[in-house]
């Protein structure tokens, strides 16, 4: 029975740690909240921000329903058969916890450069140390792992659609942020992008 509460617990921790606590820490240390959703970019960025909020809301809604009204959530056919019911929950929990740990470490490693969204006026400096020595976007990698773990814990069509949607959205947001970083930091960022993979170490290096 405990497995059905894990998607909701994971999403709650994600919001409390990665948004509420991290924004509070940013405000305390650097004087800004760092949350730039619906405040940066043009219509395209507003659309991506809106889709992110909508997807997060749908994940949260499904997690609440699965926790308190589990019969209302239709899982994918065939997953009630052995061995999937025994493999997916622990695997999903492990992936979700790994994603949360990676996300928190990556957010802390950004220091003054941490933002949710793009702050066109910010010039905090290019971060290439810590986790960023191995992956240019460890925060996005952590988010994808969290949603993948969620989908394993709660394998429904909605979970799979949102996982694919998150990946597409993450790739679009990465492209937007990397264009901004290249514009702001120029050759320093382009050299960094040639040395370090985009999401997975060694893969997605710029040419």
Image (spheres, rainbow, N blue to C red):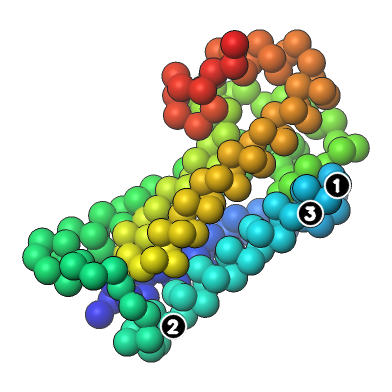
Q: Which residue is mark 2?
A: 65
Q: Secondary structure at mark 1?
A: loop
The residue at 40%/53% (across/down) is: 148
> Is the residue under label 3 in contact with that under label 1 (CB below 8 Å)?
yes
Structural distance between the alpha carbons of marks 3 and 2: 29 Å
Q: Which comes before the other along the chain, label 3 or label 2?
A: 3
User: Would you say 38 lies left or right of 60 here?
Assistant: right
Q: Which residue is mark 1?
A: 42
Point out which mark residue 28 bears.
none
Structural distance between the alpha carbons of marks 1 and 3: 6 Å
The residue at 83%/24% (across/down) is: 184
Q: Secondary structure at mark 2?
A: helix
Question: Where is 110 relative to 26, above or below?
Answer: above
Q: Which comes before the other along the chain, label 2 or label 1?
A: 1
Which of the two residues, 130 or 10, is positioned nearer the viewer here? 10
Q: Which residue is mark 3?
A: 46
Which of the two residues, 11 or 73, is positioned nearer the viewer here? 73
- Give the quarter of the figure containing the C terminus: top right
Question: Where is 34 relative to 205, above or below?
Answer: below
Question: Where is 188 relative to 13, above or below?
Answer: above
**Do we see residue 18 in this rendering?**
yes
């Amino acid at each position: 029975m405990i497995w059905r509460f894990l998607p909701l617990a994971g999403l709650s921790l994600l919001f409390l740690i990665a948004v509420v606590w991290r924004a509070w820490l940013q405000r305390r240390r650097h004087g800004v909240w760092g949350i730039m959703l619906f405040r940066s970019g043009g219509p395209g960025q507003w659309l991506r921000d809106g889709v992110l909020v909508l997807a997060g809301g749908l994940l949260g809604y499904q997690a609440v329903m699965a926790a308190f009204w589990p019969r209302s959530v239709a899982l994918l056919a065939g997953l009630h058969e052995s061995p999937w019911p025994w493999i997916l929950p622990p695997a999903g929990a492990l992936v979700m916890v790994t994603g949360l740990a990676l996300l928190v470490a990556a957010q802390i490693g950004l220091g003054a450069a941490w933002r949710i969204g793009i702050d066109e006026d910010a010039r905090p400096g290019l971060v290439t140390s810590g986790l960023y020595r191995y992956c240019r976007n460890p925060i996005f990698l952590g988010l994808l792992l969290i949603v993948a773990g969620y989908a394993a814990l709660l394998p429904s069509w909605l979970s799979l659609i949102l996982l694919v949607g998150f990946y597409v959205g993450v790739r679009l947001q990465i492209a937007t942020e990397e264009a901004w970083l290249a514009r702001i930091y120029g050759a320093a960022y382009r050299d960094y992008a040639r040395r370090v993979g985009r999401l997975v170490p060694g893969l997605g290096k710029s040419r």
